[in-house]
Image: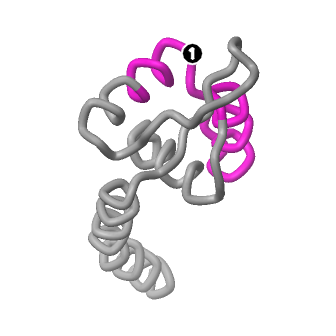
């Protein structure tokens, strides 16, 4: 899975993070290396859609984000849609 939207939302489900921390987290849990342009473009779109929100920070260089209630709901819905695909794929692999 390499969809930046789901990767960013999954990262923020673990707690508030700034961009670089998201990049490291996504690389760690998904093995996906997002470029800064991809990350920040997706962050902008997610913020515009109300799925994430900026968090006040004393560090002006790093803007942390948090998952909104709508973002949490969207992530849950999207992951539940993937579940049948994963189950079917794993079941079929076990029979081949």
In which quarter of the view is residue 44 placed?
Answer: top left
- Circle 1: element type: helix
Residue at 73% x, 35% y: name it. 24
Q: Quadrant of the C terminus?
A: bottom left
Q: Is residue 86 left or right of residue 54?
A: left
Q: Position of residue 76 (x, y in %)?
A: 37, 69
In which quarter of the view is residue 63 placed?
Answer: top right
Q: Judge by depth and name the residue closer to the eye, 32 or 60.
A: 60
Q: Judge by depth and name the residue closer to the eye, 73 or 39.
A: 73
Q: Position of residue 38 (x, y in %)?
A: 46, 20
Q: Is residue 21 magenta?
A: yes
Q: Please count the marks in the image.
A: 1
Q: Is residue 70 above or below residue 56?
A: below
Q: Is residue 66 above or below residue 18?
A: below
Classified by dominant secondary structure, the portion drawn in magenta counts as helix
Q: Position of residue 35 (x, y in %)?
A: 57, 18
Residue at 42% x, 85% y: name it. 91
Residue at 64% x, 58% y: name it. 14
Q: Position of residue 15 (x, y in %)?
A: 65, 54
Q: Is residue 11 above or below residue 38?
A: below
Residue under pointer 1:
36
> Dot 1: few (<14), some (14–19), or many (≥20) neighbours within 10 Å?
few
Q: Is residue 6 magenta?
A: no
Q: Is residue 37 left or right of residue 89?
A: right
């Amino acid at each position: 899975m390499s969809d930046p939207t789901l990767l960013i939302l999954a990262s923020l489900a673990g707690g508030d993070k700034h961009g670089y921390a998201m990049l490291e987290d996504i690389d760690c849990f998904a093995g996906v290396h997002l470029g800064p342009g991809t990350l920040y473009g997706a962050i902008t779109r997610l913020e515009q859609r109300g799925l994430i929100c900026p968090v006040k920070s004393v560090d002006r260089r790093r803007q942390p984000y948090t998952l909104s209630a709508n973002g949490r709901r969207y992530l849950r819905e999207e992951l539940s849609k993937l579940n049948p695909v994963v189950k079917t794929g794993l079941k079929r692999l076990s029979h081949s």
